[in-house]
Image: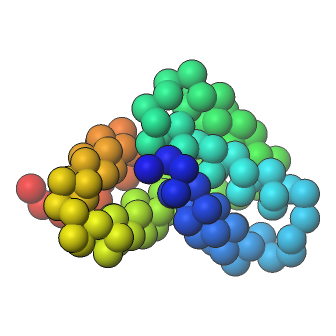
Amino acid sequence: MAFWCFPIVTDLVRERYLGVIGGAGVAVLNVVISHSHLWRARILDDSFSLRRARDELAGHIQQLGLPPDLVEDIDEDILDELMQVVTQRFHRSPTQAAICGQILLHVAKKLAFVPQPLAVA
């Protein structure tokens, strides 16, 4: 899952940061790569890589003067997108969809935001 999700996450993250920052450059590329690596670490449940990517991303966010809650907003969009992709990609394989869904639920529990369906439950 981490393998096929990486380009999806990277494209979404790039689009969001370019929308906020404006021009493409090394600073944008660095924040995009850091945020994408953070999600790969989350999906793999790799605590060492997760800490490293989180620290690296925080440094880039601070360097660019971006609001910290931007990361939370982008994370919510990523989670929504990945859930949609899992649903579409594995509609004929309920077992695989359930496994991917469980991974994303595990990730969602550790995110700073509380998705609307979880907030209501």
Describe residue 52's horizontal placement relative to residue 59 as left or right.
left
Residue, far front: 92
Residue, far left: 121
Residue, far top: 48
Residue at the (54%, 44%) spot, across then down: 40
Residue at the (80%, 51%) spot, across then down: 30
Residue 39 seen in the current view: no
Q: Name the foreground residue: 18 vs 93.
A: 93
Describe residue 67's horizontal placement relative to residue 83 as left or right.
right
**Whole-percent x and y of residue 37?**
63, 44
Residue at the (61%, 36%) spot, across then down: 54
Q: State the scheme by which the image is colored.
A: rainbow
Residue, far right: 25
Please tell me how many numbered marks the rendered image carries: 0
Quarter of the image for the C terminus: give it: bottom left
Describe residue 106's horizontal placement relative to residue 63 as left or right.
left
**Whole-percent x and y of residue 60?**
76, 46
Q: Quadrant of residue 9?
A: bottom right
Q: Name the foreground residue: 94 vs 49.
A: 94
Residue 84 seen in the current view: yes
Q: Quadrant of residue 23?
A: bottom right
**Whole-percent x and y of residue 76?**
42, 61
**Whole-percent x and y of residue 8?**
56, 65
Residue at the (51%, 57%) spot, across then down: 5
Q: Name the foreground residue: 40 vs 62.
A: 40
- In the image, residue 59 sits, relative to residue 121, either above or below, namely above
- In the image, residue 11 sits, relative to residue 106, either above or below, namely below
